[in-house]
Amino acid sequence: MQTETASVIEQRSLGGDYRVLEFASSKVAPRVKPGQFIHLRVDERNELVLRRPFSVFKTGKKSLAILYKIVGRGTQILARLRPGDRAGIMGPLGNGFPLPASQTFPLLAAGGYGAAALYLLAQQARKKGIIFIGGATADDILCADDFKKIGWKVKIATEDGAAGQKGLATDILTEYLSEKSKMRQMALYACGPMGMLKAVAEIAVKNGQKAWLSLDRRMGCGVGACLGCVQKVKDGKSWKWARVCRDGPVFECRQIVWENGKWEKEK
């Protein structure tokens, strides 16, 4: 883990409330692995006490970018940053995605800006796969061109039917697996709302596949000290608390104890 004060290189809009923010980063950026995150101090005047966690979207040798949505005071302040402004970065943090084995065909499922957390995985995977991107509207479909540029197939679903197929990302993932599941060894990776992650877990278990899920939690410290982001995970025949920031944010779906205990009972 490194800390550094990083200068903003670029802030650009992706439409709606979505933004990409790129920082100069010589210490953190070269160490980032797919699925890891940074903790960002968004207010140098110390009006906001806690840092904010953001998945790393892209990295260069001396730069990194995050993709975020303006949803509250912290991200409103973040949206005001301009080239040359500075912010405190701590990272890379957490355990990210394991890269798929060379013989494994990777399938990614993303909800909204969850696509950003999957980009480095797609970029570093030895085999090109398919990403299923879902959103409420066309404005919520993000990064599709980024994945296409690195040779991935992109399938889109929107709840209002304005782009791609009408429905959810997990609907088109299910349709694909119903046709292809016996043809090759696969691995699933997902990032998005908890309901979507649970659906991906159900799909993976049904099809006998592994699924690596990136959980999104409020994180006070980012290093496992405050216990503000805990998640129930299996521990033999019982369960224990795991710290999403330090033990995750990526977990294999069979590790997770879902709120209704469904997976716990099935095992």
Image (cartoon, rainbow, N blue to C red):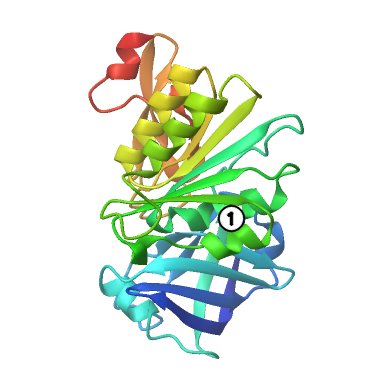
**Residue under label 1:** 119
Residue for point 36% across, 84% down:
45
Q: Is residue 91 above or below residue 244?
A: below
Residue 122: x and y, percent? 64, 50
Left/right placement of residue 136 relative to residue 34 reads: left
Evaluate whether residue 249 shows in this view: no
Determine whether 136 is above or below 177 in the image: below
Q: Quadrant of residue 8?
A: bottom right
Percent across and percent down for residue 262 are 28, 18
Q: Please, what secondary structure does the residue beneath circle 1 have?
A: helix
Q: Quadrant of the N terminus?
A: bottom right
Note whether residue 187 is visible: yes
Q: Residues within 10 Å of mark 1 (few under 14, many from 20)?
A: many
* Left or right side of 139 for 132: right
Closest to the observer, 190 or 29: 190
Q: Is residue 225 above or below residue 113?
A: above
Q: Residue at x 53, y 38 (%)?
A: 189
Measured from the top left, where is residue 121 in percent x and y?
A: 63, 48
> Which quadrant of the rendered structure holds the C terminus?
top left
Amino acid, disc 1: Tyr
Q: Is residue 183 above or below residue 225?
A: above
Query: In screen coordinates, is 187 left or right of 198?
Result: right
Q: Quadrant of residue 98?
A: top right
Q: Residue at x 31, y 45 (%)?
A: 167
Q: Identify the residue at horizontal 41%, vertical 28% (top origin).
A: 201
Q: Looking at the image, which is closer to me, 182 or 90?
A: 182
Residue 88 in the image: state x and y as whole percent. 51, 74
Which image quadrant for residue 81? bottom left
Q: Nearer the viewer, residue 35 or 195?
A: 195
